[in-house]
Amino acid sequence: MLITVRQIGNSRGVLIPAVFLASCQIEDQVDMQLQNGQLVIKPVKRKQRVGWFDQSSPASEAVLAQERAEAQDWGDASIADDSEWVW
């Protein structure tokens, strides 16, 4: 397939047909490399930040348990303790 290289701002680019994008499973990002004088464009398989907020992992459960314990420790503190204050 012959495709024209187009002027895009100060750069140049090509439009990739939708059929090619779907066939290669290309979504929003690609990995582009120069290999032996050829451009190689590969789809990015991983999703950014997947699992960051997943509460089911053992590590995150341990962190939550620690945070709960620390919050309970502060819950016993007396807020109205003004014995050291001079009024």
Image (cartoon, helix red, strand yellow):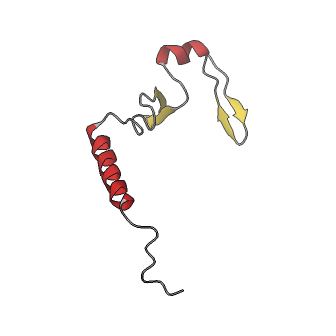
Query: Which of the two residues, 4 or 80, is positioned nearer the viewer here?
Result: 80
The quarter of the picture where residue 75 lies is bottom left
Q: Judge whether residue 65 can be spotted in this image.
A: yes
Query: Which of the two residues, 65 or 76, is positioned nearer the viewer here?
Result: 76
Indicate left or right for 22 with 52 as reference.
right
Indicate left or right for 19 with 42 as reference.
right
Residue sitting at x 71%, y 35%: 8
Q: Judge whether residue 37 can be spotted in this image.
A: no
Vertical order, 44 against 1 (above or below): below
Query: Which of the two residues, 50 or 35, is positioned nearer the viewer here?
Result: 50
Q: Position of residue 64 (x, y in %)?
A: 34, 46
Vertical order, 76 against 63 (above or below): below
In which quadrant of the rendered image does the C terminus lie?
bottom right
Q: Position of residue 59 (x, y in %)?
A: 28, 43
Q: Position of residue 27 (x, y in %)?
A: 53, 24
Q: Position of residue 51 (x, y in %)?
A: 39, 35
Residue sitting at x 73%, y 40%: 9
